[in-house]
Image (cartoon, helix red, strand yellow):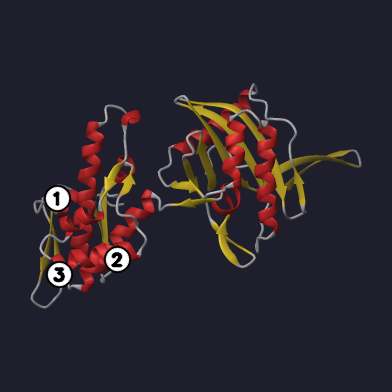
Amino acid sequence: MLQVTRAILHILDTSSGVTVFSDAELPLEDAAVYEYLIRHLEKLRARHEAKQGEFHPGSAFQEKWKTYLRKELSFRDFSAFIAEAAARAEEDCDKAVSFDLLICEFAEDGVQNLAVLKCDNKTGYTHQVENIDGAVCNKIINQYAILPSPGQRIAEYAFVSEKNEILLEDKKSFFNGEEKSLLADHILQCETEMSGKETIALVERITQAVAESFGEAPVAAAAKAKSYLAEESGRQLDQAESIADECPFVLNPEELSREIFSESEDMQKEFIEKVKEAGLSNKVPLQPKLVAKQVKNQRIKTDTGIELIFPVEFFKNGDYIEFIDLPDGTMNIQLKHIGYIQNK
């Protein structure tokens, strides 16, 4: 259960060079305000694309966060420190954008958390009523600095818990010609790991590359990798009695290499080497629900332009789909036991 306890909004309008730091917090007793905050926070907390982070030694943000947790710093002053760091960074950004910084304190399962949401300003349209020479004239005008609606996604955000656990999604920009991110590098001052989604995509690319270099079918290798991940995530989800009990499972690249390339130690070694070159750590925690969703289906496209999407478990089961290698080096794909076909 998530409960917002404090929130404040600061405006960083780089187009006009005006920053407006609020002196007052948002009124949480206003049902519309509270509903707006809750919907965005719950949606972001449910996302699986967030990366884990770890503070750099001497991170100014971490020191201020500790001070705030000790109640030696007010929420307004702490939020202003964050907004000032963002404003200083944007001065050096090669392509600065205007945005609002929404900062919230919330409790979740008894743990105190802070959310920093970067809400890029957008242009929308609204009506305006004018009186021209005694006649009512309804006009359509541009309305700048529109906040994202509760149904829209906030692309860049960070969550920091009282246990110093960091989850964030951000984008890279160029600051004085150097590629960095506003949240991780300038505000939080933290190092980030690959997200679960990025990890799975990387594993699939490496798997296919190794298979191709040894003259093996990349589709078959990718399907084996997905099948292994699907089984591991399914086992973890079966063990969890509820969503709250869901725990990450550890992806061990060496175990995965043996599963995919069981018949070739050379392919296993190359897979491990490429994993290390890509910067993937030896053991990576993955959320079972994310993995189950991402590896559920296998999608392939042939050089003849045909595309197929099929459940990954079908690859091991020749009752529904079969890949047949032909003497001339081409391949046939046979679909079996089809009861009916829908036109989509």
Mark 1, secondary structure of its residue: loop
Determine which residue is flagged by label 2: 274
Determine which residue is flagged by label 3: 331
Q: CA distance from mark 2 to mark 3?
A: 28 Å
Q: Nearer the viewer, residue 310 or 85?
A: 85
Is residue 294 toward the left or the right of residue 3 in the image? left
Q: Position of residue 220 (x, y in %)?
A: 18, 61
Q: What residue type is disc 3 on? A: Met
Determine which residue is flagged by label 1: 338
Label 2: few (<14), some (14–19) or many (≥20) C-alpha neighbours in 10 Å: some
Q: Is residue 68 above or below residue 29?
A: below
Which quadrant of the view contains residue 333?
Answer: bottom left
Which quadrant of the rendered structure holds the N terminus?
top left
Q: Is mark 1 in CB contact (under 8 Å) with mark 2?
A: no
- Give the residue displayed 28% in from the left and 59% down from the top: 204
Mark 2, secondary structure of its residue: helix
Q: CA distance from mark 1 to mark 3?
A: 20 Å
- Give the residue displayed 22% in from the left and 44% down from the top: 232
Disc number lying in front (2 or 3): 2
- Give the residue displayed 56% in from the left and 54% down from the top: 185
Q: What residue type is disc 1 on? A: Ile
Q: Is mark 1 in CB contact (under 8 Å) with mark 3?
A: no
